[in-house]
Image (cartoon, grey):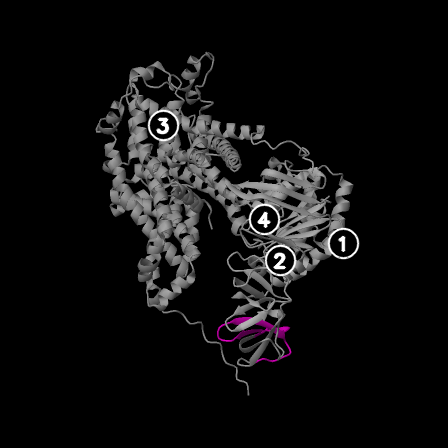
Amino acid sequence: MSAVSVREVTVAFESVRVFDGLSIDVEQGEFLVLLGPSGCGKSTLLNAIAGLLEIETGQIWIGERNVSWEEPKDRGIAMVFQSYALYPRMNVRGNLSFGLKMAKTPKAEIERRVAHAAAILQIEHLLDRRPDQLSGGQRQRVAIGRALVRDAAVFLFDEPLSNLDAQLRNELRVEIKRLHQRLGSTTMIYVTHDQIEALTLADRIAVMKDQLIQQLGTPAEIYHRPVNLFVAGFVGSPRMNFIEGRLEQAGNGLAFAVGDRRLPLDGYEFGVRPEAGRPATLGVRPEHLAANGIGNWPGFTAEIVEPTGADNLVLCTDGALSLEVRMPGERTITPGTPIALGVDAHRVSLFATGSGERL
Amino acid sequence: MTAAAPAGRRPKHVTWGRVGVYAFLICSAAFFLLPLWIMLLTSVKTMDEIRLGNILALPTDPTFQPWIAAWSQACTGLACDGIQVGFWNSVRILIPSVILSILVGALNGYALCFWRVRGADLLFAILLIGAFIPYQVFLYPLVRLFSVLGIYNSLAGIVVVHIIFGMPIMTLLFRNFYSSLPRELFNAARIDGGGFFTIFTRVMLPMSTPMLIVATILQVTGIWNDFILGLTFAGRENLPMTVQLNNIVNSAQGERAYNVDMAATMLTALVPLVVYFVSGRWFVRGIAAGAVKG
Amino acid sequence: MAIAIPLPARRRRPITRRLPAMLALLPAAFAVIVVYLGCMLWTVRLSFTSSRMLPTMDFVGFDQYARLFSNARFLISVQNLVVFGALFLIGCLVLGFLLAAFIDQRVRAEGTLRTIYLYPHAMSFIVTGLVWQWFLNPTLGLQKLVQDAGWQTFTFDWLVNREMVVYTLVIAGIWQSAGLIMAILLAGLRGVDEDLWKAARVDGIPTWRVYYSIVLPILRPMLITATVLLAIAVVKVYDLVVAMTNGGPGIASEMPAKFVMDHLFERSNVGLATACATFMLVTVIAVLAPWLYTQYGPSRRRTA
């Protein structure tokens, strides 16, 4: 039994139909990330699960209950918002306890839960302050605290870190991961457009585009075996290199051909073996290009070198192709250095030109 | 998977709460529309019908005679030339007053915003506070002053009065607007060699269209609807429509011609109502800009 | 060896650079100095004289004020001001808020409703006064209508009833101004973070409670501003009275502003009139000063 089950859901949103029978199952205790660009429908899906948006067709199950018609407060969920949405004229304690007061929770229980949440999030010293006296990071902790006190089985996060600066974002990201480990059985559904957050936090990622789930899988799967061109390009920074070419017959197998270059594809796992001669796009990540002298693709020159401290991002070109390569930071590369690149057929991805589907 | 019935009640779109909301809103709408409706109805009835007393009854024999009478025959004090006299007076007051008060306000706002003049901020503060004070506090000395200057009871006098009393809100409007524009614009114009008035006429004023619209709406409504200033400063030949209207209705001898009264009232309300309905969202913007001070 | 270099004197921009700006601000300077300050001070000065039809620059101390506060017409006008003011204020705020809150519930035809509620504000107080005077006409208006409809004993002769005539002014005033308050508060409501509503729904807080505990506190500055604006309008009320009741019946609906105007022009008693005007000035300052202090005073806390 999954913790959250979305079945064949269609949402009508301001007279526009979003999702056409979308389904997804989230396991108990899982950290699922809905990842995608703006407008892909991830927030809409989250709001539908929360009950803030009505679904037209389909069902939403939380645990063993069909909650399709339930109000958000009765679904056993808690939610954290991008803009924190703290009640401005109440202090932190008030913010944490207001919902519980509404549910007529006994006072002792309210105090226990508030103290517990405050301890976990280290906001005990802020309990008497008001939101406008807190920093962004503190406000977000309080927002998470408000979710914690609800003792819900499912936590929903709607881009909670987008309003924070880069350093705070990293800190709170770790906090959220720590929280998930600590709470164990709590299921978390997290919406973001930041693929770093997705990769670091998720047990599984649902990559979305145009109200469709492009791929649902673990971060490793998403990263190493993207199911189409969009997922491959969206996840991973710097972006995967894409090379247009065609498949050629090479002995008993196929090879990828672009210009004068060939890459034998014997090590590549095809889904469905395509015919020779069809056009294809080769995708290879910058860190999967070896540049240590011997390579099957020689003849490149380093054009632009971007040192990032830990790595050097080198744009290598041979006149026709330009490829971004990640090299160790200790090596100094000067523009103009000849580079021989090594491409490993086990690590690349092949996509059909046109549909973008993985071959 | 079993298709178990969902927990909870099916969310209804029509709840008692929503019925109550709509009921309240519709009753309120009726409250607000009723006087207008009555005004319209009465203005097309004959006096016989009106004497019957049913103020909400539809006219059995609608006639525009009251409107014609109101426009050209109603008696305002001494003359009986109808309220058209007041209409044209109001127009003659309106046009220069609106144009000049907006211009002065824009100039003030511009000067306050971009040019450091000593004491200008204090000036502005006093101007704003002055907007709150009733006209009666300034009226009599102003009357004496205008007498001395020879513009009391004249068109020039009433226009000057409207400029003076329109200044606070016009200046506020434009000052807030100009401070929302990027200062780089002004700096670029300075570097290009522009002086005070050149920058105003070539750069700022052309960009002020939204505020000019809002200001025009505010001033047209305010000046057309004004009563006390027109009564005091315009002089007998220039009495605005509101003053004439009050004369027609409240200083009638004998039986009142209610239909003519209502027709005259509608005519007076026509201009600002048209402005209101045509301007739509701009009207609300004007209120917001005026009400949210500082 | 270190030499102490004196700081250069602050360079003043040449006055020619600022001249056009100063010229442009001349009308404003004239308005402020001559009218807003000068005329106001002169009115106060006149209230200490015995001026009748024309100003006499003598000094009679607080004579005029003594006369003022034993003048029946004035005393009634102040009483009316308080009654009218309180009811008008509360009525406009409550009705305006309810209209705004209900419209905020995502109702259909919102634009039409807003247009209907706000149009009275576009009309002159004279028009409003005359329309309501007609509507509440005892012989031909509301009273006759309801009586003819069956309720024979229904009376609504407030317009000619000394005790009740002030309330007719209140009704007409609220009719004119509630829409304005609605417009202001609706803008404020729209500025409330949407996520706040979502969070309240997830927390299970009923809608009315959200308005009461969360939204109203957010709207507080706007409510205060609206109250101040309304209060100022109350002190200024003149057109409405002239059109609707002309102070009648008798002097039952007199107002201070009308008192001033009558005594300035018809009754030719400048001294008494300016005393009343000064009274109005003091009242306005008494309302304005605390509000200005809380808005712009030294204890303005900067929000994070």
Give the residue type that dot 1 points to. Answer: Arg
Neighbours of disc 2 within 10 Å: few (<14), some (14-19), many (20+): few
Marks 4 and 3 sit apart, C-alpha to C-alpha, by 55 Å
Q: Earlier in the sequence, mark 1 or mark 2?
A: 1
Q: Which residue is mark 2?
A: A271
Q: Which residue is mark 4?
A: A43
Q: Residue C124, position in %: x, y?
A: 36, 34
Residue located 61% across and 41% down the image? A8
Neighbours of disc 3 within 10 Å: few (<14), some (14-19), many (20+): many
Residue located 36% across and 41% down the image? B279
Q: Secondary structure at mark 4?
A: helix
Q: What range of the chain is rendered magenta?
A: A306-333
Is B6 left, or right, of B282 in this rendering?
right
In the rendered image, which quarter is residue A268 located in?
bottom right
Is A80 inside the magenta-drawn segment? no
Q: Which mark is residue A182?
A: 1
Residue located 43% across and 19% down the image? C157
